[in-house]
Structures are given as structure tokens and as C-alpha cells.
Amino acid sequence: VSNYSSGVPNIGVAEEPPLVPFVVSGMKVISGEFSVNEWGALITGFIKTSRQLFTGMALMPVNIRDVLLTMKSSDSLGKNIRRRGIDALEAKLLYEGKAVEAEMSIRAEKYWESKWKMEVSEDDGNENNKIFEPFLTDAKRNILRSMARPSKGCKCGSISHDLVNNPQCVLFRDVKAFASPEISTADERKRETFLLLSKKKKPRTALEAAYIERFMKLRAENDAQEEEAKFVLEMEKKQAAEMKMA
């Protein structure tokens, strides 16, 4: 007996529209963008499943695909993404991750550019500002600070001075605002040492004069490097304590 003969209308289940594949080109979604419900279910389920897989004493490493496979097999977590394949889910996560990284990179660039402009404006007469154009980031600063001293000039790239505690050096300029002004520069100490030793004894021969000059130069360089090391240690302490940066 048909439904019509019994007086009951024949109501069928509405078919779901065909799913458009998720396709990305660069940083642009070409087709098959996830709905709000799908994306919400994916990110929520991924976080919950990741925590479940890493619960317990034996923490076994898992990759994105393992998490997605486990999530898809769950009746509750995989409900709203059941029509999406593992490849599409993985592609969506990678796409969103790259989008976040790109946005963070843009914001970081704007932040460091504005910070550098402010720093330069407060030290406008420093000729070494032009070495770093358009701006200097903290990451670049740390790299330069950790480099070996070049055979000529300073780590910052300037040839107007040799050591990082020179008043014109920009590598620790951002930290100097928190440092003690009593720290003498290496160049000042170098000149003081040279003048002090030169007055102690007058050479009697050219050979003796050359020996004394060489000795004074080495002594001054050692003193300068010692002062620089003290300066760097003081700056690193201030950077950690005041700026909360390693």
C-alpha cells in the first residue's frame, strides 16, 4: 500500500549538495571554503584530540594527520566535518597557520619600524643610524651582538668605532636608558690608559720607544676589551631585569 493510498504524504530526505573541493593558491582560497561551523568544529576538535593523544605517562609524538584521523573517527568531534577528507582538513589547517604567520609578520614589522623611528629621533645626530635602513629589529640586534668582532670596525657595521660600548654604537642603545650612566666607554678608558703610561717614563732610544708604544697599545686594548665585557654584562642584566627580554 502506498503512502498516497493511506493518505500519508511521501516526504523524502533532502539530499546534501555536492561538496566543492577545498583548493588554495598561495594565500587565496580558490574554492570550497569551509563554513563557520566546519572551521569551528575542526579547530575545536583538533585541540581536544591533540590533548587526548598527549595524555598519560607515555607521550608519543603524533603528526597533524594522526590527530585528524582520530578526530574523524569520533562521533562527536567528527560530526560537522564528516564530509571533508583528511587532505582537505590538513590543507585548511596549514592555510590558516600560514595566514596567521603572515599577519603576525606584518604587525611585527610595523611595530619595529615605529620603535626604530622613535629611537632614531632621540639620537638624531648619530651617523650610524643610516647603517640600518629602514629599521633594526631586536632579533637582528641580538644576532649582531653575538657575532665575533670584525677585523676592522664594530659589530654594528660601523668603522667609526671598534667596540659596542662606544657612545655612537646602536647595538645596546635601547638598553642604555635602563643602565647606570657611570659606566665609562672603552674609547675613553683606552685614551686614559695611554696618556697615563706615556707620562711615566721617557724612552732613551728609538727601540725602547717602540717597545713602550707597543706595550701601551696592548695594555690599552686589553683595558678597552675588559671595559666592553663589563658593559655587555651590565646591559644583559638590565635587558633581562628591566625589559624582560633574554
Image: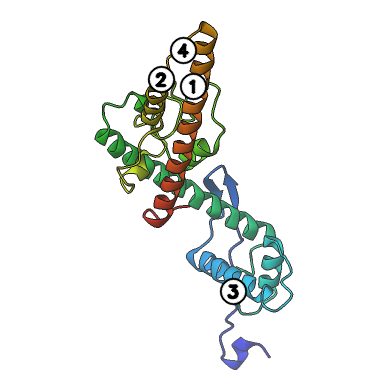
Location of residue 126 in the rendering, given as x and y in whole percent from the top left corner:
31, 27
Q: Nearer the viewer, mark 2 or mark 3?
A: 2
| Element at label 4 | loop
Tell me which numbered mark, 3 or 4, is placed earlier along the sequence.
Answer: 3
Q: Give x and y (percent) for residue 92.
A: 58, 56
Picture residue at 52% right of the left edge, 24% below the top: 218
Task: Name the front one of labels 4 and 1.
Answer: 4
Q: Residue furthest front?
A: 204
Disc 2 target residue: 198
Q: Is residue 228 left or right of residue 127?
A: right
Residue 217's label in the rendered image is: 1
Q: Amino acid at mark 1?
A: Lys
Q: Is residue 119 shown left or right of residue 29?
A: left
Q: 68 or 232: nearer the eye?
A: 232
Left or right: 149 with respect to 112? right
State whether residue 42 is above or below residue 27: below
**To which quarter of the image does residue 169 belong?**
top left
